[in-house]
């Protein structure tokens, strides 16, 4: 057991639906276990500048279903420097804080891990990014909500695609990975999913589209991950249009729409489970772990897995997408 009494928590990097649910779970489980949760506002900026506020059980009323993060977020270059982290440590000491929970992605975790080791602070990470690109966990908070938004948008796009015999290129987020593209592409019946992990040439794509046209497909949706190797949706659409004219071509870039709005039920539940698990882990004396979703269970995973390994795309899903897109 640990004698931790005050646990700081922050959200950092891109916001993700479900971050608020995780914050609520951390605060309420601190109350449950007689510890004090201290909110750090604006991510690592708040740690460096001492922007702290004690959070009570009622501070997190009615945030479970809200998108974004009420603690706010930032990207903080100062925290990458030893001086910045020393300043953060001094602020934590002054506020008698002895543990830190960082909610975010691999960059957030790399910072927390270095900080914890440098100053002997117990740290834990809760994975939250719509990209789902964090190695060591099957799911990160926000991924399910973002994928659902993409699917719902593509369903709408298909209505017009069908009505006009059109070919749509839909660009989705994911930074340099294709996790959002793959999942939402399968769920929305995309004819092709273009992602950095599985490059598809324009010639291959045109062959797929021709085959679909011959098979009497009346609309086609191509999902393009923003990090796709041979360009985003605009570039791919242009290149395809030069070689293939059976369909009228349109492009939709979903952008930040994918990060907003209510978290899905799945995200709310894993965020709640992970928030409680992070507090319990710190209180039992553990450090340097992230809460991880593995085969339906929340477990502890060394936090460095998140930034020293690269998460692999699910080959089984790649195959499913190919089989079903004929
Ligand atoms: O990491 C989440 C994410 O939404 C990526 O999918 C995207 O590439 C990036 O953040 C966008 O970042 P920003 O909101 O800073 O433009």
Image (tube, grey):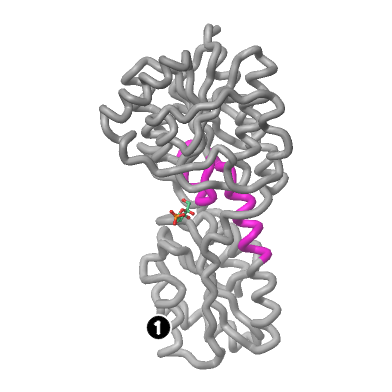
Evaluate whether residue 164 shows in this view. Answer: yes
At which x and y percent is residue 258? 58, 58
Seen at 54% across and 74% down, the residue is: 252
Image location (x, y in percent) of residue 232: 42, 70
Residue 271 sits in quarter:
top right
Q: Residue at x 65, y 62 (%)?
A: 187
Q: Is residue 218 magenta?
A: no
Quadrant the N terminus occupies: top right
Q: Name the residue under label 1.
A: 239
Overall secondary structure of the magenta stretch? loop
Q: What element carries label 1?
A: helix
- Please state which of residues 208 and 114 is positioned toward the viewer in this rendering: 114
Q: In this view, does 209 lie to the left or right of 159?
A: left
Q: Magenta residues? A: 128-152
- Would you say residue 320 is visible in this rendering? no
Q: Is 24 drawn above or below residue 130 in the view shown?
A: above
How far from the left and from the top, in percent, is residue 13?
45, 44
Residue at 52% over, 70% down? 253
Decide if residue 270 is on the left or right side of residue 192.
right
The answer to whether residue 97 is left or right of residue 320 is left
Quadrant in which residue 191 is drawn: bottom right
Other residues around mark 1 within 10 Å, as few (<14) / some (14–19) / many (≥20)? some
Task: Give how far across and how far down residue 245 sits, in percent.
Answer: 50, 92
Quadrant of the rendering where the C terminus is positioned: bottom right
Ligand 1 within 8 Å, label 1 CB: no
Please tell me whether residue 129 belongs to the stretch shown in magenta: yes
Residue 6 versus residue 267: which sits nearer the camera?
6
Asked if residue 323 is positioned above or below residue 126 in the image, the reply reads below
Q: Nearer the viewer, residue 242 or 252?
A: 252
Residue for point 61% across, 25% down: 55
């Amino acid at each position: 057991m640990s004698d931790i009494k005050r646990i700081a928590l922050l959200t950092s990097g891109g916001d993700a639906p479900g971050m608020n649910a995780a914050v609520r779970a951390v605060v309420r489980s601190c109350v449950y276990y007689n510890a004090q949760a201290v909110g750090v506002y604006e991510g690592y900026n708040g740690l460096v500048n001492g922007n702290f506020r004690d959070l009570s059980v009622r501070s997190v009323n009615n945030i479970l279903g809200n998108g974004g993060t009420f603690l706010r977020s930032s990207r903080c270059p100062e925290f990458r420097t030893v001086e910045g982290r020393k300043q953060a440590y001094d602020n934590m000491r002054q506020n008698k804080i002895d543990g830190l929970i960082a909610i975010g992605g691999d960059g957030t975790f790399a910072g927390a891990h270095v900080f914890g080791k440098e100053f002997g602070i117990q740290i834990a990470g809760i994975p939250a990014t719509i990209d789902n690109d964090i190695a060591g966990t099957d799911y990160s908070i926000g991924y399910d909500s973002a994928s659902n938004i993409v699917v719902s948008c593509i369903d709408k796009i298909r209505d017009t695609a069908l009505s006009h015999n059109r070919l749509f290129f839909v660009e989705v987020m994911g930074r340099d990975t294709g996790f959002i593209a793959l999942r939402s592409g399968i769920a929305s019946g995309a004819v092709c999913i273009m992602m950095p992990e599985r490059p598809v040439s324009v010639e291959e794509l045109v062959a797929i589209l021709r085959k679909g046209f011959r098979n009497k497909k009346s609309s086609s949706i191509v999902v393009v991950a923003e990090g796709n190797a041979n360009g985003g949706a605009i570039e791919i659409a242009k290149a395809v249009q030069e070689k293939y004219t059976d369909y009228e071509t349109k492009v939709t870039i979903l952008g930040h729409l994918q990060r907003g709005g209510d978290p899905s039920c799945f995200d709310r539940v894993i965020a709640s489970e992970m928030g409680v698990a992070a507090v319990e882990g710190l209180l039992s004396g553990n450090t340097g772990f992230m809460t991880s979703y593995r085969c339906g269970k929340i477990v502890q995973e060394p936090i460095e897995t998140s930034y020293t390994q690269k998460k692999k795309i699910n080959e089984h899903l790649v195959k499913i997408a190919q089989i079903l897109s004929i």
